[in-house]
Image (tube, grey):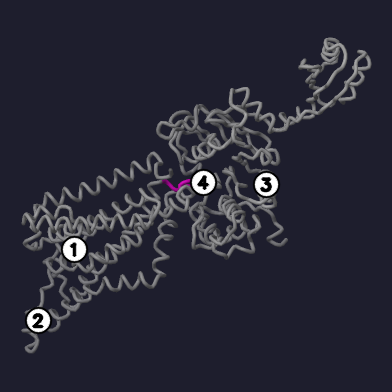
C-alpha cells in the first residue's frame, strides 16, 4: 500500500535514554554556526594571536641556538605562563569573544521564547536543567575554541618541537592554570548570557544589553581609574576582571594598573555566577520563563 | 485517581490571578472537549498537565502516573499542539518534525522516517521540504499536529487547533483528530468553538473562570436535544400537565399557555397530540427546542451564576 494511503502509523522502534535528550538541542545550536562562513571567519581571526604564539615557540626551539638568529630570538617574548596569560586575554581576542557571545548567546533562550518553541521543548521529555545544559554547552564549546583549544595546541607544539616532555613539569601551571581560567571565565560568561537571554524575547535586545554591560562597565571603570588611580576601579569591567583572573590562575605578573586584590576578582566572579544562577532558577523553577 | 487523565483539586495561579481554582475531573479515554470562553483557564490546564506552569495544590494523574509535577517519562507519552507559534523559522517542515522526534528519543534515521510518515498523514507531504515560515496558518497547525505525533504519544493535547483556520482546513483538522481517536489515542481538545467539540468529542469538560462548571458525556447531553419541546396549549392547563405526567413526561408550566415538555427517548411527539385529543384541548404550536451543546453550555453558565455573554 502506498505510504499516503496508509493512514496513521504507530512507532514501536527504539528510543534513547531520557538522560541524553539534551543532545539534539546541543547539536541544533552548534551545527548551524559551523555552516556560517562569517562565523568561521571570526574564529579564524580569533586564532591569529595564537598563531603568533606558535611561531614564538618555533623561533625559540628551532632558531634560538643559531648564531645568526640568537639575538633576534632573545628579543622575543619567552613561551611561559605570562605569554599564555597574555594570549588568553589579549584585547583583540576579548573583543571577538564578546562578539561571539552576543552573536550566538543572545538568542539561546530569547529566540525560543519569541518563537514559542521553548514550551514545545519543555513540553517534551526534556527537563529545564537539560535544556539549559544543552544551550550552555553549545556556547561554551565555541568559547573554548577561542581559549582552551589553541592553548593546548600551543602546548603540544612546544613539547613536540623541543622533544622535551619535562617542559610540562616545569610549566605545569600553564596546564592547570589555563584549565581553571577557561572553566571559570567562559563559564561565568555563559551563565550570565543565559540568564540575560532568559529575561527577554528579543535576541537583539539581549545582545545590546550584554554589549552595554560589557562596554559601559569598562568605560565606567576606566573613568573611575583615571580619576582615582585606584586599581579597585576595574571591579566593574568584565574584560579586565578576566585579564586579572588569567594572570592570577597562571601565576603571571599583572600589569601595574590591574594589580587589584585577588579577593575583589573572586568576589566579582562569585557575584556574577550567583546572580546568573539565581535568575535562571527563578525563571525556570516557577516556569516564569514561559510567561 | 484512575483513567488516562485526572485532575484532583488542581489550583494554578499567576501572581495574584488564580487561573485554575480547584479543578477536578477525569478522562477515561477517547476525545474530550475542553470548552470555555477565552480566559477560562483551558491553556493553563493543558500547561499544567505538561508541567509548563507551576501547580499550587492538587494532583494530576496522567497515564497512570500521579504527581504535582509530571516527569519526563510521562511527557514522553504526551503530544502537545500549542495554540500560538511553536515552530522554528529557517527549518523545513520535515527537518523540524524530525528534530522534535530526536528530542523525544528517536534515533536520527527513525526520526527522519517518522517525520515523513506523520507529515504525509497530516497532508503536508507535498510541502514538507518548504521552510516553515512560508506555511499558511492552517499548514502550521497541521505541522504542529505532525510534530505532536512524531513520537507516537498515547495522549494528544490540542490547544485551539482550529484557531485561524478556514472552514475546509478546520474540517480536515477535526477529521484528523477523529481519526486519532480511532487509532486508540486519547485526545484532549481545548477550544471555545462548540461545533468542534460536537463534531469529534465523546465527553466535554466546561471550564469557566478557572472552575469546572460541568463535565459529562456529549452523547448524554445531546441525547436530550430531541426530547425537549415547547408546547402552546389552548385549554385546561392543569389537565394537560397532569396528563403529561401520567404518561411519564416531564412537563413544566410556562407563561401564557406555553409548556416545556420533555419526552423520554424513543417517544414520538405525536403522543402529545393524542393527549390533547383525549384531554379536549388544542395544541396550537409545537416547537422542538434547540438544546444543542451551545444551549446546554449557556445553561451550565447560568446555573453557576455566570452571565450569558461569556465570550463565546
Residue of label 4: B76
Residue at the spot of label 3:
B174
SS type, badge 2: helix
Which tag, 3 or 4, sits closer to the chain's start?
4
Dot 3 crowding, Cα within 10 Å, few <14, some 14–19, many 20+: many
Label 1 vs 2, first from the N-terminus: 2
In what quadrant of the picture does the C terminus of chain B appear?
top right
Marker disc for residue A175? 1
The lab-note entry on whether marks 1 and 3 share a chain reads: no
Chain ID for label 2?
A
* Quarter of the figure that contains the N terminus of chain B: top right
Q: Residues within 10 Å of mark 2 (few under 14, many from 20)?
A: some
Q: Quadrant of residue B154?
A: top right
> Residue at coordinates 54% horizontally, 44% vertically from top-left?
B78
CA distance for labels 1 and 3? 62 Å
The x and y percentages for residue B235 are 88, 13
Question: What residue did someone put label 2 on?
Answer: A73
Measure the C-alpha gap from mark 2 to mark 3: 79 Å
User: Closer to us: mark 1 or mark 3?
Assistant: 3
Labels 3 and 4 positioned on one and the same chain: yes
The range drawn in magenta is A122-127
Disc 4 is attached to a residue of which chain? B
Amino acid at each position: 500500500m502506498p505510504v499516503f494511503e496508509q493512514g496513521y502509523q504507530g512507532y514501536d522502534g527504539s528510543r534513547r535514554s531520557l538522560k541524553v535528550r539534551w543532545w539534539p538541542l546541543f547539536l541544533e545550536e552548534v551545527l548551524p554556526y559551523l555552516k556560517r562562513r562569517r562565523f568561521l571567519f571570526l574564529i579564524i581571526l580569533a586564532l591569529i594571536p595564537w598563531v603568533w604564539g606558535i611561531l614564538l615557540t618555533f623561533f625559540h626551539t628551532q632558531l634560538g641556538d643559531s648564531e645568526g638568529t640568537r639575538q633576534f630570538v632573545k628579543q622575543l617574548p619567552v613561551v611561559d605562563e605570562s605569554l599564555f596569560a597574555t594570549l588568553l586575554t589579549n584585547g583583540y581576542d576579548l573583543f571577538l569573544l564578546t562578539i561571539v557571545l552576543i552573536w550566538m548567546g543572545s538568542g539561546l533562550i530569547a529566540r525560543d521564547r519569541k518563537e514559542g518553541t521553548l514550551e514545545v521543548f519543555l513540553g517534551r521529555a526534556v527537563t529545564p536543567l537539560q535544556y539549559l545544559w544543552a544551550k550552555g554547552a553549545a556556547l561554551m564549546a565555541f568559547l573554548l575554541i577561542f581559549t582552551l583549544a589553541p592553548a593546548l595546541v600551543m602546548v603540544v607544539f612546544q613539547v613536540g618541537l623541543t622533544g622535551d616532555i619535562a617542559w610540562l613539569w616545569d610549566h605545569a601551571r600553564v596546564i592547570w592554570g589555563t584549565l581553571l581560567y577557561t572553566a571559570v571565565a567562559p563559564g561565568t560568561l555563559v551563565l550570565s548570557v543565559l540568564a540575560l537571554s532568559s529575561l527577554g524575547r528579543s535576541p537583539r535586545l539581549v545582545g545590546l544589553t550584554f554589549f552595554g554591560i560589557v562596554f559601559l562597565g569598562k568605560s565606567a571603570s576606566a573613568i573611575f581609574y583615571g580619576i582615582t588611580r585606584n586599581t579597585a576601579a576595574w571591579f566593574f569591567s568584565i574584560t579586565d576582571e578576566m585579564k586579572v583572573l588569567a594572570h592570577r590562575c597562571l601565576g603571571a605578573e599583572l600589569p601595574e594598573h590591574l594589580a587589584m586584590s585577588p579577593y575583589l576578582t573572586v568576589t566579582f566572579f562569585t557575584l556574577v555566577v550567583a546572580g546568573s544562577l539565581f535568575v535562571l532558577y527563578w525563571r525556570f523553577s516557577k516556569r516564569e520563563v514561559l510567561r | 485517581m484512575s483513567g488516562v487523565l485526572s485532575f484532583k483539586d488542581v489550583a494554578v495561579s499567576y501572581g495574584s490571578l488564580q487561573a485554575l481554582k480547584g479543578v477536578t475531573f477525569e478522562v477515561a479515554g477517547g476525545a474530550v472537549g475542553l470548552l470555555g470562553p477565552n480566559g477560562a483557564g483551558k491553556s493553563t490546564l493543558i500547561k499544567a498537565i505538561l508541567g509548563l506552569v507551576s501547580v499550587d495544590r492538587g494532583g494530576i494523574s496522567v497515564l497512570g502516573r500521579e504527581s504535582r509535577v509530571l516527569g519526563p517519562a510521562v511527557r514522553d507519552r504526551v503530544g502537545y499542539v500549542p495554540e500560538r507559534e511553536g515552530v522554528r523559522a529557517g527549518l523545513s517542515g520535515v527537518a523540524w518534525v524530525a528534530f522534535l522526534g530526536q528530542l523525544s528519543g528517536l534515533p536520527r534515521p527513525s526520526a527522519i522516517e517518522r517525520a515523513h510518515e506523520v507529515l504525509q498523514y497530516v497532508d503536508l507531504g507535498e510541502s514538507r521540504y518548504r521552510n516553515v515560515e512560508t506555511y499558511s496558518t492552517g499548514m502550521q497547525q497541521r505541522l504542529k499536529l505532525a510534530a505532536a505525533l512524531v513520537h507516537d504519544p498515547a495522549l494528544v493535547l490540542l490547544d485551539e487547533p482550529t484557531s485561524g483556520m478556514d472552514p475546509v482546513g478546520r474540517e480536515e483538522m477535526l477529521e484528523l483528530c477523529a481519526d486519532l481517536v480511532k487509532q486508540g489515542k486519547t485526545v484532549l481538545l481545548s477550544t471555545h468553538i462548540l461545533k468542534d467539540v460536537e463534531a469529534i468529542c465523546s465527553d466535554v469538560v466546561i471550564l469557566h473562570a478557572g472552575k469546572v462548571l460541568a463535565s459529562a458525556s456529549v452523547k448524554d447531553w445531546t441525547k436530550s436535544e430531541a426530547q425537549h419541546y415547547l408546547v402552546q396549549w389552548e385549554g385546561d392547563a392543569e389537565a394537560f400537565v397532569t396528563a403529561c405526567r401520567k404518561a411519564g413526561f416531564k412537563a413544566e408550566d410556562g407563561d401564557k399557555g406555553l409548556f416545556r415538555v420533555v419526552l423520554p427517548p424513543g417517544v414520538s411527539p405525536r403522543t402529545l397530540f393524542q393527549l390533547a385529543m383525549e384531554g379536549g384541548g388544542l395544541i396550537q404550536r409545537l416547537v422542538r427546542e434547540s438544546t444543542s451543546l451551545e444551549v446546554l453550555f449557556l445553561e451550565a453558565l447560568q446555573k453557576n451564576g455566570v452571565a450569558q455573554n461569556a465570550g463565546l
